[in-house]
Amino acid sequence: MNKITTARWSALLLGVIYGKQRFDYLKPIAEEERRVEEAEKKAREEQERIYKQLSEANSDTILK
């Protein structure tokens, strides 16, 4: 019984250590992906805004 308990606690501790290392490895990668996605979102929103302004300007000239 004691060996089983020791093995379970050892496995839990190893899992926690592995999880911490994995998280520390993936965190900078995820931050970079979020930064890139934010930049792409800003560029896309700017293009949509320009397109909307141009389409409004074109519709104004057509109606006049």
Image (cartoon, helix red, strand yellow):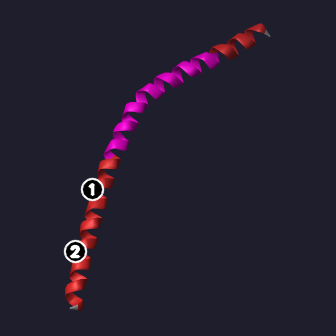
Q: CA distance from mark 1 to mark 2?
A: 16 Å
Residue 2 placed where, x, y %? 77, 8
Q: Residue furthest top?
A: 2
Instruction: Assign the magenta stretch its main secondary structure.
Output: helix
51 w.r.t. 30: above or below: below
59 w.r.t. 33: above or below: below
Disc 2 residue type?
Leu
47 w.r.t. 39: above or below: below
Residue 32 placed where, x, y %? 34, 38
Magenta part of the chain: 11-36
Front-most of 49 and 18? Answer: 49
Q: Secondary structure at mark 2?
A: helix
The circle drawn on residue 54 is 2
Q: Residue furthest right?
A: 1
Residue at 25%, 70% in the rendered image: 51
Q: Please state if 18 lies on the left or on the right of 25 as rendered.
A: right
Task: Give the mark nearest the N terminus, 1 or 2.
Answer: 1
The N terminus: image quadrant: top right
Residue 42 placed where, x, y %? 30, 54
Front-most of 29 and 44? Answer: 44
Residue at 60%, 16% in the rendered image: 13
Q: Does the magenta segment cover residue 21?
A: yes
Displayed quadrant of residue 50: bottom left
Q: Look at mark 1 in the image and give the residue it sits on.
A: 43
